[in-house]
Image: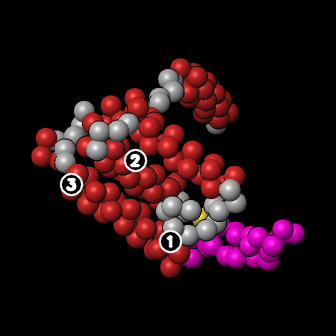
């Protein structure tokens, strides 16, 4: 039995070393690189605005549906607590799902990212351009103290 435990320990150590090495050697990807690689999987009949927009809505719906089921089953809890000293409402989120359920949720987020990349592609813009514009808009709103307001042109 001792030999078996030692073998498991050696195997586990090797696995950790392998995963560390693999992670260390992984290349970071920019948003534009992701978009370019993702669009190599786009079928010609899907390379249009309506398809990308309709399916983006569908993928967001799938994610929301899974989240709703997790809430119904008591695996997702979102609560509002007291206000902080600045008067802002504090929220608590607890998402207690299995590794398999987490993997499925991440897969849906990946599908949402693919559709978002496709939508930007058919509109002739890069994901990085979209991200930069969005961050500039949010920074402006924050600077003008209207980030919590309503409407697109605030």
Please provide the residue range marked out in magenta.
73-93
Residue 61 lies, in percent from the top left, at 36, 67
Between the C-alphas of marks 3 and 2, the distance is 15 Å
Between the C-alphas of marks 2 and 1, the distance is 22 Å
Q: Nearer the viewer, mark 3 or mark 1?
A: 3
What element does badge 3 sit on?
Answer: helix
Instruction: Tell me the residue at 40%/29% (across/down).
Output: 33
Viewed as shown, does residue 6 lie left or right of 46? right
Vertical arrangement, residue 99 with respect to residue 23, above or below: below
Count neighbours of disc 3 (C-alpha within 10 A) and say few if under 14, some if 14 to 19, many if 20 or more: some
Q: Which mark is residue 70?
A: 1
Q: Looking at the figure, which quarter contains the N terminus?
A: top right
Q: Which residue is mark 3?
A: 51
Q: Which residue is mark 2?
A: 113
Between the C-alphas of marks 3 and 1, the distance is 29 Å
Q: Earlier in the sequence, mark 2 or mark 1?
A: 1
């Amino acid at each position: 039995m001792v030999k078996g435990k030692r073998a498991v320990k050696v195997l586990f150590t090797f696995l950790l070393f392998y995963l560390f090495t693999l992670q260390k050697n992984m290349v970071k990807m920019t948003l534009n690189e992701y978009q370019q690689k993702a669009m190599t999987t786009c079928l010609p009949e899907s390379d249009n605005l309506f398809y990308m927009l309709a399916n983006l809505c569908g993928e967001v719906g799938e994610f929301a549906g899974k989240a709703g089921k997790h809430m119904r089953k008591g695996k997702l809890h979102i609560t509002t607590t007291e206000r902080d000293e600045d008067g802002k409402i504090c929220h608590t989120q607890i998402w207690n799902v299995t590794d398999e359920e987490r993997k499925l949720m991440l897969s849906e987020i990946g599908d949402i990212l693919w559709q978002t990349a496709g939508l930007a592609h058919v509109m002739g813009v890069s994901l990085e351009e979209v991200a930069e514009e969005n961050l500039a808009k949010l920074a402006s709103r924050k600077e003008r103290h209207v980030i919590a307001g309503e409407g697109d042109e605030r």
